Image (spheres, rainbow, N blue to C red):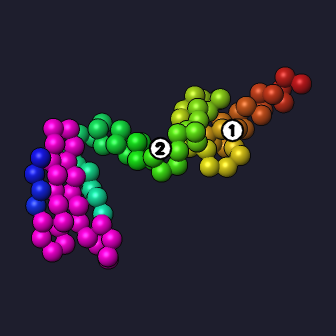
Amino acid sequence: MRGVTDSNHLMTVSGDVLSFWCVRQRGRVRVFPLGNPVYLVVYEVARVLEAVGFEKLKACPECKRLFVKVTKKRFCSTRCQSRAYMREYRKE
């Protein structure tokens, strides 16, 4: 691993899988991951789960996609909700 600093570019950390580029912007430190797109997606999913909590990660009962539950909703989208409700309506 390697680190470099200057006035705005705080640090670059390089590894085998991902690299991180850290800069100071408007008084905040921003971290930019660089690397293989697959590993970047895994990293971003881990960051979201870290921020919202694992208990909010749900599987849609209609299409089985994963989504972050932020309200009372049971489905990932209004499309899946409509499909499920219409199926129930037609059974009656």
Task: Tell me the CA gap for discs 2 and 1.
Answer: 18 Å
To which quarter of the image does residue 37 belong? top left
Whether the magenta-drawn stretch holds residue 21 is answered as: yes
Image location (x, y in percent) of residue 9 = 17, 67
Q: Is residue 42 left or right of residue 24?
A: right
Kindly state the secondary structure of the residue where label 2 is placed.
Answer: helix
Q: Is residue 27 left or right of residue 9?
A: right
Name the quadrant of the C terminus: top right
Residue name at image x 26 percent, y 70 percent: 24
Q: Which residue is mark 1?
A: 74
Q: Is residue 21 above or below residue 67?
A: below
Residue 52: in sight, yes or no? yes
Q: Which residue is mark 2?
A: 49
Residue 79: in sight, yes or no? no
Total labels drawn: 2
Kindly state the secondary structure of the residue where label 1 is placed.
Answer: loop
Q: Is residue 7 above or below residue 53?
A: below
Image location (x, y in percent) of residue 52 = 52, 49
Q: Is residue 59 left or right of residue 71?
A: left
Magenta stretch mostly in which secondary structure? strand
To which quarter of the image does residue 90 belong? top right
- Give the residue type at disc 1: Arg
Residue bounds of the magenta highlight? 5-29
Residue name at image x 58 percent, y 42 percent: 56
Give the mark, 2 or 1, whose residue is nearer the N terminus.
2
- The numbered mark at residue 24 is none
- Give the residue type at disc 2: Leu
